[in-house]
Image (spheres, coloured by chain):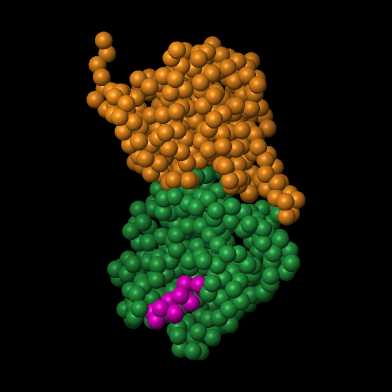
């Protein structure tokens, strides 16, 4: 991706149309925006909470593909900005820039895909899963959370699973729902027992690093969504660099060939002042 | 008689040999060795790091960069890991294919000197003094708007480093030439002109300033004519190499800056607008221009617009 359309980076002020509780700590915020409506799965937006902060969030639904024409972001409370955003209600105003970055590439019709989501990481995988299903890709979804109370998107996933359009396996670390254990353990089993053309993943980096290692052993290409501190979102400020790449512009989706040369991947990230901190 | 360089784009600034007259501007990427290396591989003739100070600094909360239609407005707030940690990135670039210029800031002349010395020790080919960041109190333009402080900072830095020292000037003063004179008299080897212009954007729906710092610096096409004027005035009044900076987005802009008196140009905002390929786009365009106009070297057009 070389040039970017200035129009995409212009901040639009949009009204929150609806807010949905996903679980005790996570909400999905719906809004209407033409540019987000034509986004691709895996792209992110910068959401401005006026007077508080501006944060990067992946689109968890894309207007042109949702029943009500709304796009959404899904936010877990982790700090001041996410707390403020989670506390917002329908009718309030937020700023939106984007969509930015590259996107998941779907495999061709009849292919076999494994999707591995960890916690809130499932947000960026939801539009992908829906796209895979549309394209008749045989899709297995592994979803790992700590405990039953951390589950989210279970309505959307459960519906697809009940219709037989995806194979869904849920893991919880405490065994309160689905299989007990880590999602990476489930992934190891699934990968060794079936043939897959691609593995998609989004979640904690340590989890994705493990998934990448498993896929590499089997020679299966991956597409992972990486997260770093993002400021400008247009590839110039240098806050989100991983190896020679910028998460905001070259990513956020990284393929196996790129992951192999990123020496930071799975090891360290840069904090707000640019110092290395271990993953 | 001087022999013609075989590469018409090759030039020299204060003793630094450049394979072409483009540089990655300070504040753009420049946070890590890996990304600086990529900028060099993308065709830049030299790279300037993001500004480094004596201590780690987080910068401001978002929004830090805002699109304003005619350019970008930013107040990132000089985030950096401090020179001690950044020295590791500098050392990692020992084999870089182009000159590495470390941008330095401080809150006092002593701090500028301390950081510059450590940067050169780690392997910087030159230092650029950030005397012009418009949005950090007590550093950058706060010190860089006062000729006596500029002079003291440059003198201190020159006293501790044996590499070229560039002074990056703020345009947010009534007399940029006066500032430049102070820098040159104190020993600056080159001038970089200009940094961003103090600016602001307010959202009308929420009635709030958009930048968390409220006020920031404007870059990009909007400021190019101001920058060209500054370079022109500096070239007219002073005998020191000038690096033009401010809205360079095409080869035509680069040529315009050189005609005004710049020996080289820095590219920043255009990395967003056109991608990292911008360096190649500019150098190829400048090369074609030189051929079309019959010049053997890019050096021949520096300051050409000043002729009678």
Q: Residue at x 59, y 69 (%)?
A: A71
Q: Residue at x 33, y 36 (%)?
A: B284
**Residue sitting nearer the eye, B215 or B26:** B215
Residue B112's x, y, as percent?
Answer: 56, 25
The N terminus of chain A sits in image quarter: bottom left
Q: Residue at x 47, y 82 (%)?
A: A168
Please tell me how many numbered marks the rendered image carries. 0
What shade has chain B been given? orange
**Residue sitting nearer the eye, B251 or B9:** B251
| Magenta highlight: main SS | helix
Residue A96 part of the magenta segment? no
- Give the residues drawn in magenta, as a range: A126-137
**Residue sitting nearer the eye, B301 or B1:** B301
Task: Decide: is B73 above or below B298.
Answer: below
A259 on left or right of A39:
left
What shade has chain A been given? green
Residue A25's x, y, as percent?
Answer: 66, 70
Does the rendering let one see residue A207? no
């Amino acid at each position: 991706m070389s040039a970017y359309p200035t129009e995409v980076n212009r901040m639009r002020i949009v009204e929150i149309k609806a807010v949905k509780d996903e679980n005790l700590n996570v909400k999905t915020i719906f809004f209407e925006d033409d540019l987000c409506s034509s986004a691709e799965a895996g792209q992110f937006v910068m959401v401005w909470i006026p007077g508080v902060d501006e944060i990067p969030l992946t689109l968890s639904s894309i207007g042109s593909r949702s029943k009500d024409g709304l796009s959404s972001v899904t936010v877990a409370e982790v700090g001041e900005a996410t707390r403020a955003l989670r506390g917002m209600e329908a009718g309030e105003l937020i700023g939106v820039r984007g969509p930015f970055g590259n996107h998941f590439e779907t495999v061709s019709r009849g292919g076999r895909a494994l999707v591995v989501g960890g916690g809130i990481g499932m947000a960026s995988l939801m539009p992908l899963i829906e796209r895979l299903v549309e394209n008749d890709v045989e899709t297995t979804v592994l979803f790992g959370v700590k405990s039953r109370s951390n589950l989210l998107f279970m309505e959307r996933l459960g519906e697809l699973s009940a219709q037989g359009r995806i194979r869904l396996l849920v893991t919880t670390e405490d065994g309160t729902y689905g299989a007990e254990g880590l999602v990476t353990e489930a992934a190891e089993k699934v990968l060794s027992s079936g043939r897959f053309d691609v593995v998609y993943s989004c979640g904690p980096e340590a989890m994705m690093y493990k998934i990448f290692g498993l896929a590499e052993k089997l020679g299966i290409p991956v597409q992972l969504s990486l997260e770093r501190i993002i400021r400008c979102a247009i590839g110039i400020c240098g806050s989100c660099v991983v190896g020679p790449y910028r998460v905001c512009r070259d990513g956020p989706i990284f393929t196996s060939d790129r992951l192999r040369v990123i020496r930071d991947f799975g090891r360290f990230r840069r904090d707000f002042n640019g110092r290395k901190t271990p993953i | 008689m001087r022999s013609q360089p075989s590469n018409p784009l090759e030039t020299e600034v204060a003793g630094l040999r450049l394979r072409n007259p483009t540089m990655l501007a300070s504040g753009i990427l420049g946070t890590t060795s890996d990304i600086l290396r990529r900028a060099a591989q993308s065709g830049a003739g030299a790279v300037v790091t993001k500004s480094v100070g004596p201590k780690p600094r987080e910068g401001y909360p978002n929004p830090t960069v805002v699109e304003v239609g005619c350019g970008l407005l930013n107040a990132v707030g000089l985030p950096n890991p401090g020179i001690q940690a950044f020295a590791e990135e500098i050392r990692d670039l020992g084999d870089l294919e182009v000159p590495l210029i470390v941008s330095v800031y401080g809150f006092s002349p002593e701090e500028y000197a301390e950081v510059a010395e450590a940067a050169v020790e780690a392997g910087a080919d030159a230092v650029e003094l950030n005397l012009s960041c418009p949005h950090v109190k007590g550093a950058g333009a706060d010190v860089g708007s006062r000729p006596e402080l500029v002079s003291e900072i440059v003198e201190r830095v020159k006293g501790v480093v044996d590499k070229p020292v560039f002074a990056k000037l703020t345009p947010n003063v009534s007399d940029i030439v006066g500032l430049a004179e102070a820098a040159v008299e104190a020993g600056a080897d080159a001038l970089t002109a200009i940094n961003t212009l103090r600016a602001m954007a307010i959202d009308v729906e929420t009635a709030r300033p958009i930048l968390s710092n409220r006020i920031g610096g404007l870059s990009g096409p909007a400021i190019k004519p101001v920058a060209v004027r500054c370079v022109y005035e500096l070239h007219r009044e002073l005998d020191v190499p000038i690096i033009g900076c401010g809205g360079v987005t095409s080869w035509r802009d680069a040529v315009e800056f050189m005609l005004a008196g710049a020996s080289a140009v820095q590219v920043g905002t255009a990395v967003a607008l056109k991608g990292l390929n911008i360096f190649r786009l500019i150098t190829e365009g400048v090369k074609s221009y030189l051929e079309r106009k019959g010049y053997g070297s890019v050096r021949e057009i520096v300051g050409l617009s000043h002729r009678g």
